[in-house]
Amino acid sequence: MTDFSQYASDWAARAKAASRQLVMATGEQKNAWLQRSADLLRARAGEIIAANTKDLEAALGYGLTSAMMDRLRLDAERIGKIAVAMEEIIALADPVGEIFESSVRPNGLLVTKVRVPLGVVFFIFESRPNVTADAAALCVKSGNAVILRGGKEAFHSNQAIHCLLAEALRETGLPEAAVQLVDTTDRDAVGAFLRLRDGIDVTIPRGGKSLIERVASEAAMPVIKHYDGICHVYVDASTDLDMAREIIVNSKCQRPGVCNAAETLLVHRDAAAEFLPQVAAALKAAGTELRCCPRSLELISDARAATEDDYRTEYLDLILSVKIVDSLDEAIAHINEYGSHHTDAIVTRDIAAATAFSASVDSAAIHVNASTRFNDGGEYGLGAEIGISTDKFHARGPCGLRELTSYKYVVHGSGQTRH
């Protein structure tokens, strides 16, 4: 077994040196890198697709689900979207150096709170090679150096994308070590990085529950994470049933293998008799398997009985749990008990119900009369995101540029001394 301690230390030392250079980089320099990276992604999409083909062929032996294979797959359209996401970040304000609080003390001291980068980010992710570019773009724009460690499923795709990002760094005069891609898939290397309390400022895992649990358990530095995306749509007694049907079908079926897809439908008893048969037909037409509570089974044919475990499961597939509830309070209690504090939606005409739901459901994002699929950095106007956090410190929800910064106090005086 290889000892990766020195290996990880060397990578972190390069990243630390690069992060100190990035602090002084101008917004124009960082934007020039983003634009050049986007141009290279488009111009050399064929190289990325060829590498991705190798990964897709190898993945057949990994036992990946259809949803996981979809996450892994790249084509010209998806590569184009990666490039667009990088260009969207160009349009966002550079957070580094922003003074977001200031005051003048009675003695004349000007006390300012200034936004600064976190430093070195260790980012671990699985299966989705587009995340290589998204994470790099957000980290560099926010002044952070990033060490990327992708899963073995996307090894060749990640290398191809990273090669272009590094080329753009060299061309635009930014330190190449600002974006490093770990060149081994050995799991022991991850452990070595996670022990580097002094070399890495924050770790961000993005992947399955086992990965998140491992990182949270082993990391010696702060971690920004979410475990599961057990998201709910609650259809209230007072609601537009057509709108509710469109929202739940979109939340579940538009892309079922992602963390903001709905996994449970809750329906108020007063709406259930009319709503459930019609929404079940729409969901089944989209290929969705329904797992129902005893009362909803009476209204939906060809459905399975839900178990207790079903309500705690992130399916990441075309499977949906269904439950009838007697009240708004019961829906809120169910979500807080079974949910993962990620994204939960209410469909209602009742402003008081929407207000109570928004205040009482303890999740990173609450959507009123909108699909859960909108909990996304791009959809929220943040540009690409590095992940969606269900933590409460220091970031919650989609993590964009500002969530990759901290702050320092900078105090200006004119010779004041303390007495």
Image (cartoon, helix red, strand yellow):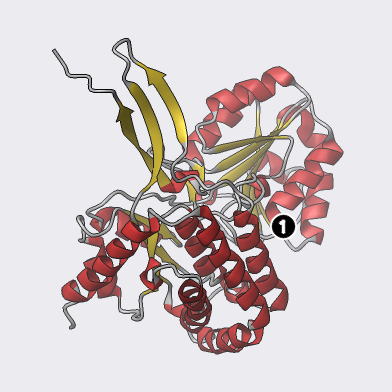
Q: Nearer the viewer, residue 358 or 319?
A: 358
Mark 1 surroundings: few (<14), some (14-19) or many (≥20) residues within 10 A:
many
Q: Give coordinates of residue 43: x percent, y percent.
A: 67, 81
Q: Which residue is mark 1?
A: 253
* Residue at the outermost top position: 106
- Looking at the picture, tell me which residue is in the foreground, 329 or 406: 406
Q: Is residue 326 left or right of residue 172?
A: right
Q: Based on the displayed image, in which of its 4 quarters is residue 79 positioned?
A: bottom right
Q: Residue at x 80, y 44 (%)?
A: 245
394, above or below 209, in the image? above
Q: Quadrant of residue 269?
A: top right
**Rendered residue at 45%/57% (across/down):** 139
Residue 292 visible in the shown view: no
Residue 69 position in % (x across, y down): 59, 75
Q: Specify the amino acid type for callout 1.
A: Cys
Q: Vertically, is 178 above or below 272?
A: below
Q: Quadrant of the N terminus?
A: bottom left
Q: Nearer the viewer, residue 94 or 341?
A: 94
Image: 174 above or below 46: above
Find residue 409 and report its horizontal and vertical position in percent: 32, 32
Closest to the observer, 390 or 271? 390
Quarter of the view holding residue 147: bottom left
Q: Quadrant of the C terminus?
A: top left
Locate residue 42, reporting x and y percent. 67, 77
- Identify the residue at the far left of this view: 419
Residue shown at the point (42%, 54%) measured from the top left = 143
* Left or right relative to 322: residue 196: left
